[in-house]
Image (cartoon, rainbow, N blue to C red):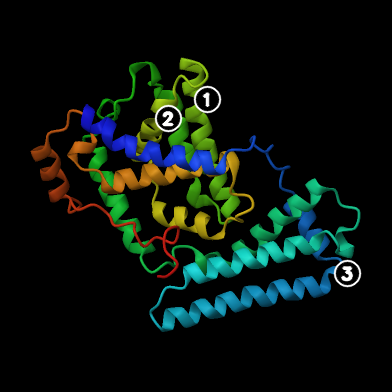
Amino acid sequence: RQHTKNHLQIFRTRLVLFNNNKMSTPPTPPPPPLTFQTFLEKMRQQSAGSLVREVKTFIASIADADDADARASRGGAQKHGVAVQAFLARIEASFATHPAWKGSTPAELDASGEGLEKYIMTKLYAKTFGRGARDAERDAALHARIAALRTFIEAKHLDIAETSHAAASWALAESELGKINQFKAPRDKLVCVLNTCRIINNTLTTRQGSDGGADDFLPVLIYVVLRANPPQLESNVQYITRFRAESRLVSEAAYFFTNLISAVQFLGQATAAGFTGIDQEMFDGVMREAGVLEPIDFSSSSSTSSSE
């Protein structure tokens, strides 16, 4: 039991440090409902002609660069992420003085920024999702490793308190996470993560009171990810990291997303010592038979490295 607590404490410590750095200000209110159709209507206005051409030229440049990277057998996802982030920030800033957005409220400008990100990334999805040098490799390894862990890991092995058990809510959280591959826009994928985490958090709060289930949140999320095991999970994490506008990946969204990253890395790297009541020989035997005994190396992921 102590081994598990020590192992999970490493991830909790990272989250506390992240929380102190990123959530020192009060949580921001949720953004207004995304009115993608309204954004498209503005882009169809005559006054937006030059802006539309600029956006289309940018999309073509990323697509062409990806083709060149593919021919040269090199990964370009990280540099594409940097380029997209810069372009999104510059174009969204221009909305405030653009004739097509004259008289728009801050909320309307924010919704247009969301629309811009969705438009660009939907067009570029095939050229940007899972295109990191090791995304596909890690996807396959992670999916296989979690599948092996699912055969014998139970909630008790993660030291989840009996008072935190909520099978129906956990199943709903698994279902939300499982929807992540239905969407192309980074925001829409992130919403799946937020819905998953909110279900867990609300259930713990209801059962144990405010902050009462804080120690169980990460273990429950790990268990939910274990049971859901959606395909291409690492590619989804990296896609959100690379292409979700940095100005919007803050507060609650950033906190919950960081928890997901910790859960993924725990499952990708945990040994028998990371769980309570799991025999080392049994663990190694099952994982070795599945070909997934070795931990996954996440060290060169785009969130921690500038090159691929």
Between residue 122 and residue 98, name the one nearer to us. 98
Q: Which residue is mark 1?
A: 202
Q: Secondary structure at mark 2?
A: helix
Q: Is residue 162 above or below residue 178?
A: above
From the viewer's perspective, is the residue at label 3 or at label 2 nearer?
Answer: 2
Q: Secondary structure at mark 3?
A: helix
From the viewer's perspective, is the residue at label 1 or at label 2 nearer?
Answer: 2
Could you tell me how far apart the alpha carbons at marks 3 and 2 are, in whole angstroms?
49 Å
Within-10-Å neighbours for mark 2: few <14, some 14–19, many 20+? many
Q: Is residue 279 above or below residue 31?
A: above
Q: Quadrant of the N terminus?
A: top left
Residue 162 location (% of width, % of height)? 33, 17
In this orientation, does residue 138 appear? yes
Kindly indicate whether the residue at mark 2 contacts the one at mark 3 (C-beta within 8 angstroms). Answer: no
Q: Which residue is mark 3?
A: 47
Q: Quadrant of residue 148?
A: top left
In this picture, residue 218 sits left or right of residue 199: left
